[in-house]
Amino acid sequence: MDITVLWSADDVLAIGIAAVLPRAEARLRIRAAVREAVARWLKMDIDAISLESTPGAPPRLLLAGRPAGLSFSHDDGWSLAAIHLHGAVGIDVMRVQDIPDWRQVARDYLGPQVTLELASLPDAQRPLALAQAWTAREAALKCAGLPLAEWDGAAPACRLQLLSLPAPYAATLAY
């Protein structure tokens, strides 16, 4: 399996696999990729790494029985995963595209400041900036254990890292 390391720090790892697959198969492949990548990253036996998944609950990563933060995101063509050894983590990926009702989407989900910033951009730059703002919001909400919701004026406290993916994708890691 061809695993791309998107970002790495002492206790945080973000990986991706590029493949156009049915969602169920993409989910299985990224889970296998997490075990393989973590085994290499931490120089652990892959059999000491397990993932637990229960419908309706976030997935859990266990490293020799110790829990670690784990987050997944999928878009057609890419599946991403983020691992945080000592805390919560969130990741999100999105295909960059022109969204005709971008102003309403931004106002409802990203807040007035981001809406103003997006409005100030030339039309050609707006799709990428919107995708980056959206993935940052989604990743931060995942990191905080919160569902996607309309803007309420609060931004979860976390560090954000834009990830480098080939066009036409944008992705953000939150930890």
Image (cartoon, rainbow, N blue to C red):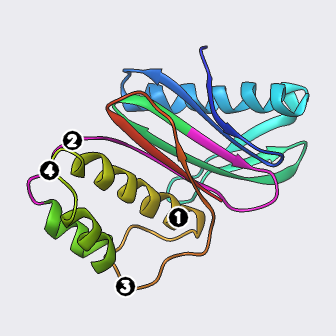
Say which amino acid is labelled 1: Ala
Question: Looking at the image, do the residues carrying marks 1 and 3 touch, with CB atoms under 8 Å apart?
Answer: no
Instruction: Indicate whether 78 appears above or below 2.
Output: below
Measuring from the top left, give residue 81's x and y in whole percent.
59, 40
Relative horizontal placement of residue 50, taking residue 99 as reference (left or right): right
* Number of dots carrying numbers: 4
Question: Looking at the image, do the residues carrying marks 2 and 1 touch, with CB atoms under 8 Å apart?
Answer: no
Observer-nearest of 37 and 167: 167
C-alpha span from label 2 to label 4: 12 Å
Question: What residue did someone put label 2 on?
Answer: 97
Question: What residue did someone put label 4 on?
Answer: 123
C-alpha span from label 3 to label 2: 25 Å
Which element carries disc 3, helix, strand or loop?
loop
Of labels 4 and 3, earlier in sequence is 4
C-alpha span from label 4 to label 3: 27 Å
Instruction: Indicate whether 175 appears above or below 29.
Output: below
Q: Which residues are magenta?
A: 81-101
Residue 52 falls within the magenta-colored stretch: no
C-alpha span from label 2 to label 1: 21 Å
Say which amino acid is labelled 2: Gln
Of labels 2 and 1, earlier in sequence is 2
Q: Quadrant of the N terminus?
A: top right
Q: Which mark is residue 152?
A: 3
**Residue, x 76% and y 38% (percent of image)?**
50
Residue most extreme to the bottom: 153
C-alpha span from label 1 to label 4: 26 Å
Question: Looking at the image, do the residues carrying marks 3 and 2 touch, with CB atoms under 8 Å apart?
Answer: no
Label 3 Cα neighbours within 10 Å, binned few <14 / some 14-19 / many ≥20? few
Measuring from the top left, give residue 57's x and y in whole percent.
56, 59
C-alpha span from label 1 to label 3: 14 Å
Question: What residue did someone put label 1 on?
Answer: 140
Label 2 Cα neighbours within 10 Å, binned few <14 / some 14-19 / many ≥20? few
